[in-house]
């Protein structure tokens, strides 16, 4: 199972960052400001999904950004674009006409560790909970 950031609505990683380098964009994407990150690793330890790491080159926290530089230009994240079988879907769940909204209405999906109250924003279709 891939380890991607769940871009939680209630992000523990944002809460524990002592310098405010981890933040949520206006679109709800959880990001790290590399210029302000001091590499303390608090966010790495706080992430209940194990998706953050300290980049060995920059010595700062790093993670999936949902290709923020692409989505702000109306493009899809690179992983969605590159997937040869269309297994990844990206979109606005608030738009009832979007592909993601349609799939979530029509298919069974799972959130990883919903009991933690982080409100993850990555949905897994047909995921067997034994692999989590």
Image: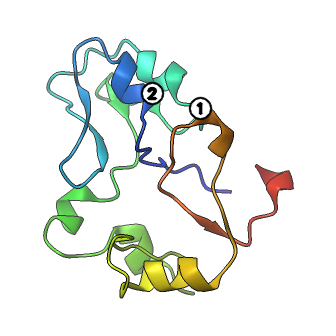
Q: Tag 1, which secondary structure?
A: loop
Tell me residue 23's x, y (percent): 25, 34
User: Which residue is the site of mark 1?
Assistant: 48
Tell me residue 46's x, y (percent): 51, 22
Number of the label disc, if any, that sits on residue 109: none
Which residue is at the front of the view, 68 or 118?
Answer: 118
Quarter of the image with the N terminus is bottom right
Q: Residues within 10 Å of mark 1 (few under 14, many from 20)?
A: some
Q: Is residue 54 above or below residue 124?
A: above
Q: Is residue 21 left or right of residue 127?
A: left
Query: Which residue is depicted at the point 49% across and 49% down?
Result: 6
Query: Which residue is depicted at the point 70% across and 75% down?
Result: 108
Query: Which residue is depicted at the point 43% across and 23% down?
Result: 43
Query: Which residue is depicted at the point 41% across and 47% down?
Result: 7
Q: Is residue 32 left or right of residue 74?
A: right
Which residue is at the front of the view, 83 or 92?
Answer: 92
Residue occupying the far right of the picture: 130
Q: Residues within 10 Å of mark 2 (few under 14, many from 20)?
A: some
On the question of residue 34 being in view, the answer is yes
Tell me residue 40's x, y (percent): 37, 12
Q: Tag 2, which secondary structure?
A: helix
User: Which residue is the site of mark 2?
Assistant: 12
Q: Is residue 128 left or right of residue 20?
A: right
Q: Are marks 1 and 2 in contact (CB under 8 Å)?
A: yes
């Amino acid at each position: 199972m891939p380890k991607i950031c769940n871009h939680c609505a209630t992000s523990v990683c944002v809460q524990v960052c002592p310098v405010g380098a981890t933040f949520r964009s206006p679109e709800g994407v959880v990001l790290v400001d590399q210029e302000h990150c001091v590499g303390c690793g608090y966010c790495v330890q706080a992430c209940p999904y194990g998706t953050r790491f300290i980049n060995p080159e920059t010595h700062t926290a790093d993670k999936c950004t949902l290709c923020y530089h692409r989505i702000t230009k109306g493009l899809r994240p690179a992983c969605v674009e590159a997937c040869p079988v269309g297994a990844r879907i990206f979109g606005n769940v608030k738009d009832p006409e979007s592909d993601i909204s349609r799939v979530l209405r029509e298919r069974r999906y799972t959130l990883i560790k919903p009991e933690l109250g982080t409100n993850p924003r990555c949905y897994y279709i047909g995921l067997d909970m034994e692999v989590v």
